[in-house]
């Protein structure tokens, strides 16, 4: 279980609005003054994330809670969203290359076109799959306890 601390910002019936801050581990070394990553982190790091979650815990505004997300679900979604489109892109590019060789079409245009078509089709297919077929409640974080 991946766990994160959050603060209760509002309560609405059985649901609560919690806020957590995305923090970077960068900037803790001796090179932080000359490192470009720590400079970027100053401008783009520490973003606040708001989530509305359901709970049976007795909470009040300002309480600190522990929010958890199942690791297995996180890994599966990561593979689905990142690895599958990359594999489809490569597969379609190989198909485009084979067709280009078979029909003796010069250049890389067919390979690139097929790769992009496969990637875009996979993107929209995943978008449809996530919206229509997957139960979003399985992927939502849960409130584990009051800290």
Image (spheres, rainbow, N blue to C red):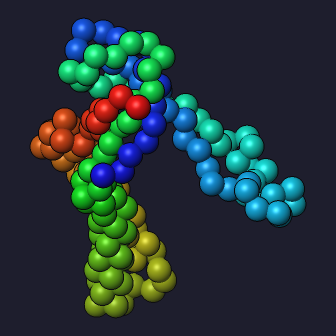
Residue 142 lies, in percent from the top left, at: 27, 35
Instruction: Identify which residue, 94 or 141, lies in the foreground.
Output: 141
Residue drawn at point x = 41 percent, y = 24 percent: 18
Is any part of residue 100 visible from this angle? no
Farthest top residue in view = 13
83 left or right of 36 in image:
left
Indicate the quadrant where residue 146 lies: top left
Q: Is residue 105 above or below residue 137?
A: below
Q: Is residue 21 above or below residue 130?
A: above
Residue 87 position, x and y percent, is: 32, 72
Residue 120 is at least partly visible in this image: yes
Judge whether 58 appears above or below 95 on screen.
above
Q: Is residue 32 left or right of residue 96?
A: right
Q: Is residue 137 left or right of residue 77?
A: left
How many marks the image carries: the answer is 0
State the residue at coordinates (43%, 42%): 4
Which residue is nearer to you in this view: 94 or 18? 18
| Residue at x 24%, y 58% (from the top left corner) | 72
Q: Is residue 140 above or below residue 40?
A: above
Is residue 30 or residue 78 the one in the foreground? Answer: 30
Spot the residue most to the right. Answer: 34
Where residue 46 sits in the image (x, y, percent)? 62, 39
| Image quadrant where residue 28 sits | bottom right
Residue name at image x 30 percent, y 87 percent: 98
- Residue 73 lies left or right of residue 39; in this view the side is left
Q: Position of residue 39 (x, y in %)?
A: 79, 50
Where, quadrant-wise, is the C terminus in this rendering? top left
């Amino acid at each position: 279980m991946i766990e994160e601390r959050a603060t209760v910002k509002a309560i609405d019936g059985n649901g609560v609005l919690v806020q957590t801050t995305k923090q970077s581990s960068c900037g803790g070394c001796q090179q932080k003054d000359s490192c470009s990553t720590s400079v970027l982190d100053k401008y783009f790091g520490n973003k606040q994330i708001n989530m509305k979650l359901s709970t049976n815990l007795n909470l009040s505004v300002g309480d600190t809670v522990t929010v958890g997300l199942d690791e297995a679900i996180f890994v599966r979604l990561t593979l689905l969203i990142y690895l599958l489109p990359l594999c489809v892109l490569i597969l379609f590019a190989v198909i485009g290359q084979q067709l280009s060789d078979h029909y003796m079409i010069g250049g890389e245009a067919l390979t690139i076109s097929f790769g992009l078509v496969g990637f875009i089709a996979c993107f929209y297919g995943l978008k449809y799959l996530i919206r229509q077929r997957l139960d979003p409640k399985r992927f939502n974080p849960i409130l584990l306890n009051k800290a």
